[in-house]
Image (cartoon, rainbow, N blue to C red):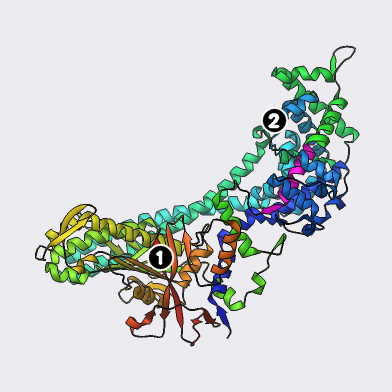
Amino acid sequence: MNKHKVNSIQDYIEEQSNYFNMVAKRFVGEQKYRESLAAIEHGLACLGISKGLVKVFQNRSNFILELGHKISEYEGYELPLFIGHKKRGMPIPEALVEKCPREIIALIEQATNRRQINEYSKDLHKVSLAPDIFFAIHKSIVGARVETLLPDILSDVERLGIASIKDAVEKIPAIYLNYLSATSLTKLIRKLSSILRDVRSKSEEELKTIDLYSVRIKEQLEGLFAETNQGLHDIIEKDVVQDADTNVITQKVSNLFSRLDRLFLGNIYHLKDYQRKKREIRDNFKQEEDLKHYAETRSLDITKPVSEIFDEYIFMYKFGPPAKDEYKNFTKSLTLEMEEIYRKKSRSVSMLKKFEKRGLIAVELEIEKLLDVYNSFMKKTIIPDYVGQCFLNLVGCLPPADNEAPRVAVDLANLKTVFLTGKNVLELEEKVAERPREIVDYVGRHRKCVTILVYDIRGSSYMGIKLNDAVKEQRIKHKFAKEMAQVVKRYDGFLLKDTGDGGLVWFSENSGSLYNYLYTESVTGKGTKLRYSICSGGECDIIPAADAAKRAILCARDIVQRAEEFIRANFVHYREWFEDVAERTLELDGITYALLPPEFKSLFRIGVGIASGVPDRDVIFAPNSYGDPDLVGPILSDANLYSRERQPGRSVIICDLPTLINLVLNADDFEYPLEENDFEKYCKVLREFRQTTHGYNFPDLKVSVVPKGVHLLGELNKNKAIVDARVDDVIIDDRNNVYDADNKKIKMLYEVLTI
């Protein structure tokens, strides 16, 4: 077994985290890069410019430049450097311009970042067009092209492997659904309906079966009610009236209602499942009906994004100029579109006079001239503008601009430090393949987990001794525990035990739903809340969750805050509760109260222990010998041990490394606890910081997690099991156990602090 640096484990956790995945997609998105490069290549082909001029961008998944060095240090990368200067608004040396293709520079200089065609009104007016006229031409020519291609899409649709209407909408190019005429779209829908006929028939049969099963279940529920009613009547008639043993009566009633609970809830869950399937089938039917009326509801107007207009034009361009029949369809469609513009008395009508000619009978539009102006505008304005913007999108730049938000600068610094390598031209570092299998397996198994939380109320034993009044003690503890239970429910935790001195809670994907399924709660006539288990023994599978650690830590944070609020709200009652205790003076929040002995400084402070693991190995959930749902597993004792950690006068939250792994992996945002504001200095400090075993800040959660110590798992003396030590090297075996350099089985521990 090999030794591994603890910081290398943390490095891998960070690299695999949601946060860095989001940052990488935002600043180095491979999909965005590929789409931008493809648009550039298509646009250049349309404009008659060689793709060889952008060879520097090809065969890459991203392009990131670190600006600020001499031009000579970017040899071969002058065009990306030009783009970087342009994006940053930096002066561009003439020597740099001379080394870049003039055709490409012209496109970049023309880019304006306009998003919709109505933003081109001034440019359109110069060629006697308006946004509505331009879009009418675009809509007509695209519609004519897709009408011509209808036979191809009808023959291709069978090869797409369509399993539902939703599937069809995703696989058929949107340009057909948006621009086919109502008649042609109907043909396509009929084709789809024909392909899905068997699927629909099976769905209809399944719907009938579901309805039949639903009726049967409802009948079973009615029968169950009648059976229970009769059983209760028999108990009263045969046992209660005849003075049978009360234990026998109690047992019979308990069995009767236990059976009712199990069968009733089981049937209800089956009924719920049938209803869900029924909704899914009906949703599919509705989607099919909606598609049939899609031609009537679709809407295309001048707010259509320029990116979509560009893509649609390129789609047409690939098939060449319109054929005779296609041009005929275009003419007919455009004439109808222009008549609609006339009918609406649009302001742009006056511009159409340039495209009118007087015939023998009436004024006619010069369709060819309109089409020429449209094509010219696309090639001289829209395509150059959009392609130029795509060039700017291709290149990412470091350091961030001076006007960037501080958070953006931090994200870029983190990205550079963690993922990027190289000088001047930066590359994404392929680190995953370099990580040892043990680290990959150990971290990966905790992406989803089950998290146990144990909280322990400080000073409860001392309180009981001093009170010497069980009723008063119960009333105080009940008041406190009730507030703790409210916090647990807020985070969908399963409150398994309330011990009076604390509690045990667990979190998983189904912890909240299992609690509601396995327990029934009621309130007595005196207002006392009761709960009782209706566990039948077969509903106890735990589903690990990606947010188990997050919910546990938020729950712990709020438990501690609620405890502090309880202390502030009830401190004034301490004198009443502990009237026999000697008084001194204390000023708390500006108010003078009776000061109790030092032991009371910790009263109602909380110790919270959090431990995480995977089902079956680290924890199982099953009925105990009394038939009540219970947890078994090593992480329960771990969490209980961590809850005993004490700090003078304050609450403490301790968690283990698996909890931190689950939290960091699934966090959308975290920060390194560094104060440096300068970009380059921050990167340098961060590189050094990541060489150590370190903690994290989670601003959204308002907590930080910092290294605390080590849990010696083999130490049976609980007072010696947690040591204040820092481990730099660990060994991970094939069963994902962790050992220190002395071959002692350990868990690294962290403290959770509020920020």
Left or right: where 45 falls relative to 382:
right
Mark 2 closeness class: few <14, some 14–19, many ≥20 residues within 10 Å: many
* The one of 85 and 516 positioned closer to us in this rendering: 85
- Residue 188 to residue 729: above or below: above
Place of residue 495 in the rendered image (x, y in percent of width and height, measured from the top left): 34, 64
Place of residue 224 in the rendered image (x, y in percent of width and height, measured from the top left): 35, 59
The amino acid type of the residue labelled 1 equals Val
Left or right: where 129 falls relative to 592:
right
Place of residue 227 in the rendered image (x, y in percent of width and height, measured from the top left): 31, 60
Place of residue 319 in the rendered image (x, y in percent of width and height, measured from the top left): 86, 42
Left or right: where 108 falls relative to 7:
right
* The one of 103 and 714 positioned closer to us in this rendering: 103
- Residue 446 to residue 567: above or below: below
The magenta segment = 382-402
- The residue pinned by badge 1 equals 752
- The residue pinned by badge 2 equals 118
